[in-house]
Image (cartoon, grey):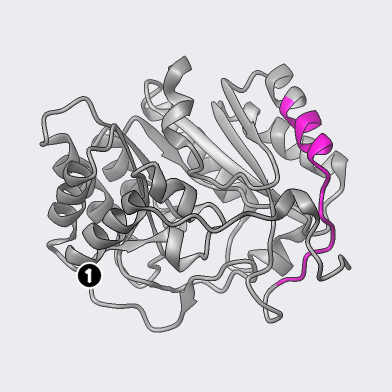
Amino acid sequence: MASQRRPEWLRRDIQVSRTSNEVYNIIDELSLNTVCKEANCPNRMECFNRSTATFMILGRVCTRNCTFCNVSKGEPEAVDTEEPRKVAAAVSKLKLKHAVITSVTRDDLQDGGAGHFAEVVKEIQKLGQAITVEVLIPDFDGDEAALDKVIASKPDIINHNIETVPGLYSKVRPMAIYERSLELLKAVKDKDSTILTKSGIMLGLGESEAAVINVMKDLRSVGCDIITIGQYLAPSIHHHPVIEYVHPDIFEKYKGIGLDLGFKNVVSAPLVRSSYHADEVLSDK
C-alpha cells in the first residue's frame, strides 16, 4: 500500500482569486451542484480561476456504492425541474464556450435521469451561442431507450467513464458492469457517429500495466475517441486505498500508447480528471 505522504508531483497550491469567488457566487446563487466540490477535485481552484466548472445535476446523493468516490451515497433527493434552466443560466453568466454536465447515478428513476440530461443540453443550446456541450453520464442500468434520449439531444461529447480495469470492478465499482459500459460507448457511435465519445480511467488502484493497455484497446474497439488517465486519490480512510502513486513518466508512456492506438486525444497526467481542461479536447473534432 502506498505511503500516506503524497509525492511532490501531486501537491497543489490553493489558489483563490476574484474569478474563483465569482464562480462560487454564481453556483450558490442558482443553487447548483458541481462535481468539483462534491467529489473534492484537486483541480477545482484552477478550473474556477479559468471560469469553468463541471455541473452535477440530479442532486448530490448517488444510488451506487463505488468505493473510490467522495460523492454522498444513500436516499436520493427530489429532482429539481428548474435545474436545466438554472444550468443554462450559469453557463451564460460564466460565459462558457464549453459546458460539462455530469450527475450522480439515479437508479431510482425510471430512465435513470436521461430525460433530465437531455433537457439540460437543450436549454444550453437555446442560448444560441457557439457553446459546445459535453455530458458525463452514468450507465442508465443498460437501458437503451434512456441512452437514446441523451443521444437525441445532440451533445458534442458523450463521456462515460470505465474508471478501472475489469479485474478490480468487484472492489471498486461493485454495482457496475465493465461490458455494459463498453456497450454504452459503442451504442453512441452506432446511433450517431457525429458525437464524440470519451472515457476515463484511474491509476493506482492495484491494476497492472497490461490490464490498463487492454482497457485502452477495448475502448478503441468500440470507437472511443478521447481518453483521460489520472491518479486515484483516496478521499478518506474509508474509501479504497491508494495502492500506488504512479510516476508522471508512466502517464506519458500511456499517452503515447493511446495515440498509437488511434485515440483522437489522450489527456494523461497524475492530476488529470474526467473534465480537466475539457474545452481543449475538441480541437480535433
Neighbour tally class for label 1: few under 14, some 14-19, many 20 plus, Cα within 10 Å: few
Quarter of the image with the N terminus in it: bottom right
Magenta stretch: includes residue 247: yes
Q: Which residue is the site of mark 1?
A: 79
Question: Left or right: 43 with respect to 100?
Answer: right
Where is residue 260? Give x, y as percent: 73, 17
Question: Left or right: 272 with respect to 257?
Answer: left
Magenta stretch: includes residue 49: no
Magenta-tinted stretch: 240-255
Where is residue 117? Give x, y as percent: 27, 51
Examine the rendering and report whether any part of residue 4 can be seen: yes
Quarter of the image with the C terminus in it: top left
- Choose top left, top right, bottom left or bottom right for residue 154: top left
Q: Give the amino acid at mark 1.
A: Val
- Choose top left, top right, bottom left or bottom right for residue 238: bottom right
Q: Secondary structure at mark 1?
A: loop
Where is residue 244? Give x, y as percent: 84, 58
